[in-house]
Amino acid sequence: MDLGTRKILDKSFTAVGITSILLMAVALLVVIVPIFSGGIGAIFFKGTIEHRKLQYEEFGNGDREVIQRQIEESDIYRNKVFAMLGEFETELESMTPAESRKLRSSYKKARKVLSHLLGPLPGDQEPILLRYRYGTTRWEQAEEALHDLLYVTKWDYSDPTRMAKQYFVPRMEEFKGTSLAVFFPFMEENLANMMLPEQTFYWGFITERSLDAHIFGGIWAEIQGTFFLAVGAMLFAFPLGVIAAIYFTEYAKDNLFTSILRSANSTLAGVPSIVFGLFGLAFFINTVKVSESKSVLAGSLTLAIMILPTIIRASEEAILAVPKAYKEASMSLGSTKWRTIVTVILPAALPGIITGGIISLGRAAGETAPIIFTAAVSVGATIGIADVFSSPTPALSWNIYNLASEHEAANEIRHVQYGMVLALISIVLLLNLSAILLRARISKKLKG
Amino acid sequence: MQITAEKKESTTSVATESSKREIFLPPDRERVREGGTPHVSAKNFSIFYGNFEAVKKVNADILSKYVTAIIGPSGCGKSTFLRGINRMNDLIPSCYTTGTLMCDGEDIYGRYTDEVQLRKKIGMVFQKPNPFPKSIFDNIAYGPRLHGVKDKKTLEELVEKSLRKAALWDEVKDRLERNALGLSGGQQQRLCVARTLAVDPDILLLDEPTSALDPKATAKIEDLIEELRGSYTILIVTHNMQQASRVSDYTMFYYEGDLIEYAPTKQLFTNPKDQVTEDYITGRFS
């Protein structure tokens, strides 16, 4: 090949390489940016007076006097609204049944939307569910609720060849000529006065438990559950994996049995995680009965089985990469095999072993399928360390799926879903980062 | 297939030749009488890698407190023989031995021999400097600690003594806590010697200790061997015939697994008895 062609080939290969890396980076950005902005929105947002009220009443956060004063401030406007409603209700009473029938149902709908916005209205029953006891806690949700209050959503089915089109009709028109007509412009003008939005830094999203199935509150229970599961899995898998790797590299003879063990290990690494989940249910819960039903213990054991092959592989590679000369030197000084492994080989292989361990820890933290049947519940209390043997736990990975697909109010708690995703990604990234740093530190120490 | 078959034939033919030759060594009886006593003696000692006989029926006495050099072309079995003495070949799964190899009246390959105790007595320095990735102090202290020395004071004394013996103390005394991998190649090799000396062996096996070093570092190692002569029984495998003639009292010449000649160094280099030895030392093949 002549020099010209070679140079062209080199350059075009570089170009292809750079392009593919750039493509990856763009794809990553497309995924990361919404997750990041959405996730940050769970912690940093415009909170309404309802948010502060809830925080004070349920968690005891905030200054009582300030909140009291703000409630009084907003009540000035709210009371005006309630007065309008009262006036309209007496007006309804005085109408003939025929006149009032249509208005009554429209009024009922409007009232429902309003109670979603402001919280329970005078004359409502004391709600049982927490979500009905407070109005909207986030300003952007308040604005959406206002829109729902001001406009009725209708669908245009006139053209059967096309998809139905959405359009909005002002709700005010239904109440034309009644005393409630002034209510709608008043709401539009005074929403901010009623809700008192403020920039809020809600650190409690990370440190507090959730209330009423994640409609309010934070995700501490999930973070803690993830932590318990992942650390528990490591407690089982890491020692076992390293010991197995030592066996494979230092003790196993090259025979059929060993090669079967090796290929079994490789096969395990490729088994889909849902299979491990079913295995965990069938083996740990139904057969061995480590716990009555789902528990952190059963989940940790299942995750441990799942990450074991990775840890074995990583440790094996790390041990094999230790120069043979170290082993020879140690043996020639009169060291036993075991002593050599503990004092020379393992320390030299430590960076690789730890990297493999932490990456597996990240995987255990992020895996969903193995814990569905063995450990995870969608809504649960924060558990103590003593409960891990018997009680299940909410966990980030499972709850992300659950909130996005099965939650009854999935649309209203997008910020919680994004917040969880961000929390999980941050945890895994932090773990990987610490692996890199730790590795660099130990390698530096080894190299001198 | 054919090639391997041929090779096998040729090796067997040499083996039979060598058994006909019947060299019983060492020949320099005078020096033995002067105070040289056999330290390691091989009788019909062979080392096999699977089916391949790497060292063939060697009969030799290695004399106590003398420096014995082992020379020969690549693949002649000289390193294998050396590693056979402290059973480093045990690390190779397919390796086994026949015949006997005695050290201080004890069978090295005896059924009840503790190879760990044996290796403590027979230290080894390898071709490539191989300090542990630990501090200089910990490198030297590794062996003593292994054998139960815990007292810090004793360890410090031992480290200093060993480093002084290896002529390294003055260069590293201020940085004992530094990682040993930061030393130069020659220093690392002397560190390895010091590390071996720290367990107080009787025999030192040096497996081409200077082949990875520059001439200056090589000279230092040779000086070191000169220093240690008389205190230890030293065996040194080397490719460098000048080195062998400089440092050793006796020289063994191996060829294709056979111990061809074993004589006082001066005699072997000036008046070799065997044609093959002469061809080798005069550089007709290597």
Image (cartoon, coloured by chain):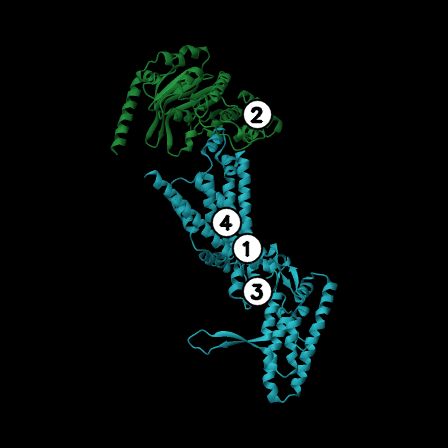
Chain colours: A cyan, B green
Tell if the residue under mark 2 belongs to the same chain as the one under mark 4.
no
Alpha-carbon distance for marks 2 and 4?
42 Å
Residue at x 28% of width, y 28% of height: B7
Q: Which mark is residue B27?
A: none
Apparent side of residue A175 relative to residue A366 in the rendered image (left or right): right
Packing grade of label 1 (10 A; few <14, some 14-19, many >=20) is many
- First in residue order: circle 4 vs circle 3: 4
Q: Which residue is mark 2?
A: B172
Disc 2 to disc 4: CB gap under 8 Å: no
Amino acid found under the numbered disc labelled 3: Ile
As helix, strand or loop, the secondary structure at mark 4 comes to helix
Name the secondary structure under disc 2.
helix
| Mark 3 or 1, nearer chain start | 3
Question: Can you tell which quarter of the image residue A380 is in?
Answer: bottom right
Does residue A133 appear left or right of residue A437 in this picture? right
- Judge left or right: residue B234 versus residue A117: left
Residue at screen point 65% across, 80% down: A180
Above or below A19: residue A351: above
Residue under pointer 3: A413
Image depth: mark 2 or mark 4 in front:
2
For the point 50% across and 39% down, the residue is A349
Residue B284 vertical placement versus A153 (above, below)? above
Q: On screen, A336 above or below A237?
A: above
Asked if one can make out residue A393 in the rendered structure from this viewpoint, the answer is: no
Front position among marks 3 and 2: 3
Q: Disc 1 residue type? A: Leu
Task: Using the image, name the chain to which the residue with label 4 belongs.
Answer: A
What residue type is disc 4 on?
A: Ser
Residue at which label 4 appears: A360
Chain ID of residue with mark 3 = A
